[in-house]
Each structure stands twice: as C-alpha cells, then as structure tokens.
Amino acid sequence: MVLIGIACDLVNPALVLAALINVAIARQRSRLITILPLALTCALGMSVVCGLLFIERVTALQGSLGFDYSTHTAFAMVMCAGLSTSGYSKRLLSLVLVEYLLLMVLQGYHSVLDLVVTGGVFTLILLGVGVFVQRVSVKLAS
C-alpha cells in the first residue's frame, strides 16, 4: 500500500513537470504561441479548481450531501486537458487519469462517488474551457 500512496503522490507533479517541459521546449524554439492552449486551459481550469474548493470550504455543500470534493482529481483532469492541447496523446492521458483514480480509490483517499461527482462537474467545465480556448487560439492565429 505504501507504493500505491507514493504513486498517487507522484501523478500530479509528473503532469506539471510534463507541462513545464513542454513550455521550455516551446520557449527554446521561440514558439511560445504554440503553448497558448496549454497555458489558457491550465490557468482557467486551476482558477475553477481553487474557486470550487473555496466554495466547498465555505458552504460544505458536498460534505452535507455525503461526498467529498476531490481537488486532486480536478487538478489532474485540468492538467490532462491542458496537455492534450499540446500534442500529448489523449489516449495516454486518459489512461494516466483512470489509473490515478483507481489508485486513489484503492488507497482510500476518496470514494468512487467522490470521483464521479468531481469528474462529472469538471468534464462539463473543461468542455466549456476547451471551446473558449479554441476560439481564442483561432482568433490569435488569424
């Protein structure tokens, strides 16, 4: 179980590291505009992650309904969505996310209901963020 805990603790930092490597490569090639979708997706998504965490802390709405807002799940979903805009395999990112969720359940960090509710909310949010980022990217490209 210790190894599962270590694996869980390494997923989000690994996703951030992948994003930073992507930014460094784009900077080195003087193509920072290519990482705009990654930067916008992560910035907007993380704002929502923090905003919902604040709302949950103030209202305790999810706790009163019997489940827990999984900040780690939301963070991982945002990072995977951001990385998918910059050439990373969507299949690989989906696999990483699903395995991460399974590890969190096995470790007892969250229940399946916690992850489904957080995942459902963030899927809808990230769809909206994706549409916005795509529109901004198209406008800047023209």
Image (tube, grey):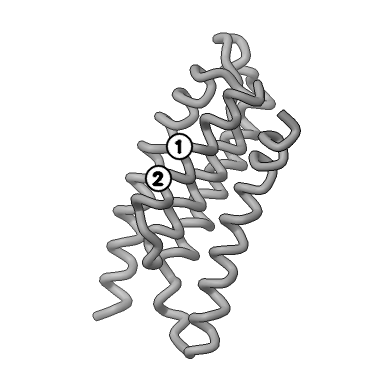
The residue sitting at 61% across, 49% down in the picture is 12
Task: Compute the Cα span from label 1 to label 2.
Answer: 6 Å
Q: Secondary structure at mark 1?
A: helix
In which quadrant is the C terminus drawn?
A: bottom left
The residue sitting at 56% across, 49% down in the picture is 46
Position of 126 compared to 29: left or right?
Answer: left
In which quadrant is the N terminus drawn?
A: top right
Q: Secondary structure at mark 2?
A: helix
| Crowd tier of the residue under label 1, counting other residues whose Cα lies within 10 Å: few below 14, some 14–19, many 20 or above | few
Residue placed under numbered mark 1 in the picture: 98
The residue sitting at 61% across, 56% down in the picture is 14
- Disc sitting over residue 118 in the figure: none
Give the residue type that dot 2 points to. Answer: Ser
Choose between 7 and 41: the one closer to the eye: 7
Give the total of numbered labels.
Answer: 2
Residue found at the very far right of the displayed protein: 2
Q: Position of residue 37 (x, y in %)?
A: 40, 65
Q: Position of residue 86 (x, y in %)?
A: 40, 67
| Crowd tier of the residue under label 2, counting other residues whose Cα lies within 10 Å: few below 14, some 14–19, many 20 or above | some
The answer to whether the residues at label 1 and label 2 have Cβ atoms under 8 Å apart is yes
Position of 122 compared to 14: left or right?
Answer: left
Task: Give the quarter of the image for residue 28.
Answer: bottom right
Residue placed under numbered mark 2 in the picture: 94
Q: Please determine whether, in this image, residue 48 is positioned above or below residue 90.
A: above
Q: Position of residue 30 (x, y in %)?
A: 48, 90
Q: Position of residue 4 (x, y in %)?
A: 66, 34
The residue sitting at 44% across, 37% down in the picture is 122
Give the residue type that dot 1 points to. Answer: Val
Task: Give the quarter of the image for residue 136.
Answer: bottom left
